[in-house]
């Protein structure tokens, strides 16, 4: 009886889990779930996409994922880690609607120190910023402010040893809760300090988050299309906050050139390509629209997501299980 009630209570959450980890549905539409966020950002947009912008990939509709009784038992055991996910998206929308032009546009050392303390409390692993250009936004998308803060939060690499699995799905959903809280908390803090700020939840970005990590200097996009960062490799989730703060460069220093060697490493590695179950990862990048190179055939990739959100490329990436500095040192010695 208790099990049946719990199963019924978590039914909608289980359906939503499919979307949050792979973009597929069991009676729900992730496109509809993220639409209020997209609409709110567009309504407050001051920077809009251009003719050179890439097309945003819509979440796939119509696929159904079957959960076993074992899967449901695992979900129930971990329900406290993921149940707040829908709430974090709703909070994001509320904060976007509260956004304003901002009384301040320059952050002081004292306020930035408070922000750094907040980021430590939120367990942000790496962060950077970049100035948003129209061609970086997806077609039809706008953002309220010129600058973007990008945050990286680790997923547990041990869970991805089991990929594809329900264990990975729960881990992804758990970190989506965390990254949603990060974007919302940072936006709330900066709004209270008089800045113009809007969060963009990890789900439903106005731009390519992997590329955002690269533009912000905290990562570089690997052949699997995901950002590889120093601390988290490819096993992470990213969130973004748009702001009017124009002097972030006085406090945040990044050097993306230090990551350039990863491109060479990826070109020689190719484990993600060889092990992709749907052969979705391209040998060479292509530009289909916009100016960002595409490294993945997303039609093929989406078919793999039906299998527990896949995650094989994260599992196979050497940066998921290996130490960044050790990999770099060993590679440069052999080069």
Image (tube, rainbow, N blue to C red):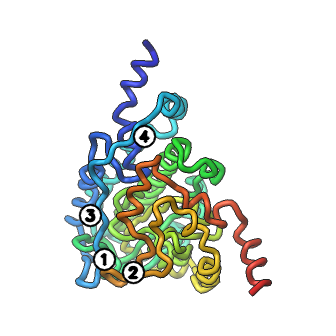
Which mark is first along the chain, 2 or 1?
A: 1
Quadrant into which the N terminus falls: top left
Whole-Å distance between the Cαs marked 1 and 2? Answer: 7 Å
Q: Please give the residue where the numbered disc 4 appears in the rendered image.
A: 84
Give SS at disc 1.
Answer: loop
Which mark is first along the chain, 2 or 4?
A: 4
Eye-nearest disc, 3 or 1: 1
Give SS at disc 3.
Answer: helix
Q: Please give the residue where the numbered disc 2 appears in the rendered image.
A: 292
| Image location of residue 297, percent across then percent down | 40, 69
What residue sits 23% from the left and 66% below the top?
Answer: 42
Whole-Å distance between the Cαs marked 3 and 2? Answer: 22 Å
Give SS at disc 4.
Answer: loop
| Image location of residue 277, percent across then percent down | 50, 59
Residue 26 vs 191, above or below: the answer is above
What residue sits 37% from the left and 68% below the top?
Answer: 242
Q: Please give the residue where the numbered disc 1 appears in the rendered image.
A: 54
Residue 220 vs 180, above or below: the answer is below
Query: Which residue is outermost to the top?
Result: 1
- Which corner quadrant of the image does residue 327 belong to? bottom right
| Image location of residue 201, percent across then percent down | 39, 57
Give SS at disc 2.
Answer: loop
């Amino acid at each position: 009886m208790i099990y049946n009630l719990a199963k019924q209570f978590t039914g909608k959450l289980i359906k939503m889990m499919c979307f949050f980890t792979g973009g597929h549905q069991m009676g729900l539409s992730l496109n509809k779930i993220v639409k209020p966020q997209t609409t709110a950002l567009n309504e407050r947009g001051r920077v809009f996409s251009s003719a050179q912008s890439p097309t945003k990939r819509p979440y796939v509709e119509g696929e159904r994922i079957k959960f076993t009784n074992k899967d449901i038992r695992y979900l129930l055991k971990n329900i406290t880690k993921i149940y707040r996910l829908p709430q974090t998206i709703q909070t994001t929308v509320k904060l976007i609607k509260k956004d304003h032009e901002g009384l301040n546009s320059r952050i002081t050392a004292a306020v930035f120190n408070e922000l750094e303390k907040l980021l430590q409390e939120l367990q942000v692993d790496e962060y950077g910023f970049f100035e948003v250009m129209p061609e970086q936004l997806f077609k039809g998308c706008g953002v309220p402010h010129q600058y973007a803060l990008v945050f990286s939060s680790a997923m547990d690499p041990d869970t991805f040893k089991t990929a594809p699995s329900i264990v990975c799905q729960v881990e992804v959903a758990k970190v989506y809760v965390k990254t949603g809280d990060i974007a919302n908390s940072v936006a709330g803090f900066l709004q209270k300090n008089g800045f113009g700020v809007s969060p963009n939840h990890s789900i439903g970005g106005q731009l390519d988050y992997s590329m955002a990590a690269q533009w912000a200097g905290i990562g570089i996009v690997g052949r699997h299309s995901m950002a590889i960062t120093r601390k988290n490799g490819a096993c992470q989730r990213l969130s973004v906050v748009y702001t009017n703060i124009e002097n972030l460069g006085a406090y945040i220093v990044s050097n993306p050139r230090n990551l350039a060697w990863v491109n060479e490493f990826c070109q020689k590695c190719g484990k993600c390509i060889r092990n992709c179950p749907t052969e979705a990862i391209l040998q060479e990048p292509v530009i289909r629209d916009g100016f960002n190179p595409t490294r993945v055939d997303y039609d093929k990739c989406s078919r793999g997501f039906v299998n527990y959100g896949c995650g094989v490329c994260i599992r196979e990436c050497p940066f998921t299980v290996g130490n960044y500095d050790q990999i770099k040192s060993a590679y440069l010695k052999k080069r």
